[in-house]
Image (spheres, rainbow, N blue to C red):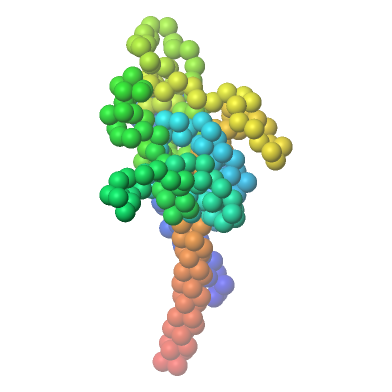
């Protein structure tokens, strides 16, 4: 009987965990979003470090030309499996403004692990001017900020297609079947063979989209694995505590009767 009660407690706890799972609403999307099987989904989900490194490579070589990541520092790349020396090398590829120096002047220097990711533009006005009036969104939290999460971001990256009959596109506009509203200013950013992978993973636009979405999911929620681990520990504690309380209750009422 006690085991049956434990099963009920465990199932209830698991159900509570799943209440917060994302649900894809059809509103705003002409086509249903892709239903991807991400390794980081679910109460026991984890990030794939190989995918994270490949995704960072895609961001670095493709996306970072227009999209910044204001919330990330180079030191955060340690979570992707990079060593301290590798992070220093990656950071040093960029120059950042520092100062003032002893003469009161600002100066440029190679970036350090303690620096934020370098932004592609000096300010929003410069970004809009370079992109035909459209402001490329910051990518730091985009997976959390968009309805549909990772599936939406991946869908937009693979959703470019010819517009249906009757849809007229303006200058610098493109048709994307998964984009909310279906009109997007960004041209298709990914093509087969665009980024070189050294681990043998297929170098296709679809794989690039999966990997960079994986990286962006981590960027939006880097503490996810620790949070889920703590959640599992709490649920186990509550289940054991419930069993103990049930046993105490039976003992008390047994003595009363």
Say which residue appears at 46% left-offset and 57% top-offset. 223
Q: Residue at x 56, y 38 (%)?
A: 57
Residue under the image location 40 percent in, 43 percent down: 108
Of 108 and 53, which appears nearest the observer?
A: 108
Tell me what residue is drawn at x 46 percent, y 72 percent: 238
Q: Quadrant of the C terminus?
A: bottom left
Point out residue 225 in the picture as x, y percentages from the top left corner. 51, 57
Residue projecting furthest to the right: 200
Q: Please say whether residue 8 is visible from this viewpoint.
A: no
Across and down, in percent, residue 55 comes to 55, 40
Above or below residue 237? Residue 220 is: above
State the residue in front, 212 or 38. Answer: 212
| Residue furthest out toward the top | 166
Relative vertical location of residue 134 with respect to residue 222 in this rendering, above or below: above
| Residue 16 appears in the figure | yes
* Outermost residue, front side: 103
Residue 151 shown left or right of residue 183 in the figure: right
Q: Relative to 201, does residue 13 appear above or below in the rendering?
A: below
State the image coordinates of residue 109 (x, y, percent, origin top left).
43, 46
Left or right of 153 in this view: 70:
left
Q: Position of residue 61 (x, y in %)?
A: 53, 33
Nearer the observer, 106 or 123: 106
> In terms of depth relative to the viewer, which is nearer, 105 or 29?
105
Total marks shown come to 0
Image quadrant for the N terminus? bottom right
Report which quarter residue 197 is drawn in: top right
């Amino acid at each position: 009987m006690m085991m049956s009660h434990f099963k009920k407690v465990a199932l209830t706890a698991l159900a509570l965990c799943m209440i917060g799972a994302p649900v894809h609403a059809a509103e705003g999307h002409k086509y249903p979003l892709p239903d991807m099987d991400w390794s980081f989904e679910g109460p026991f989900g984890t990030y794939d470090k190989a995918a994270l490194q490949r995704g960072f490579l895609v961001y670095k070589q493709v996306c970072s030309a227009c999209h910044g990541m204001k919330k990330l520092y180079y030191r955060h790349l340690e979570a992707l499996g990079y060593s301290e020396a590798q992070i220093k090398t990656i950071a040093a590829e960029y120059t950042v403004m520092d100062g003032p120096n002893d003469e009161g002047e600002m100066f440029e220097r190679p970036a350090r692990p303690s620096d934020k990711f370098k932004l592609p533009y000096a300010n929003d006005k410069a970004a809009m001017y370079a992109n035909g009036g459209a402001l490329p969104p910051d990518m730091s939290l985009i997976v959390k900020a968009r309805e549909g999460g990772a599936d939406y971001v991946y869908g937009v990256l693979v959703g470019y297609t010819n517009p249906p009959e009757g849809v007229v596109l303006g200058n610098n506009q493109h048709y994307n079947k998964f984009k909310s509203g279906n009109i997007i200013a960004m041209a298709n950013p990914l093509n087969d063979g665009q980024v070189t992978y050294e681990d043998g993973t297929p170098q296709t636009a679809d794989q690039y989209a999966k990997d960079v979405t994986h990286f962006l999911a981590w960027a939006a929620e880097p503490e996810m694995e620790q949070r889920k681990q703590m959640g599992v520990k709490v649920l186990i504690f509550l289940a054991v505590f419930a069993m103990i309380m049930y046993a105490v209750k039976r003992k008390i009422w047994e003595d009363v009767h």
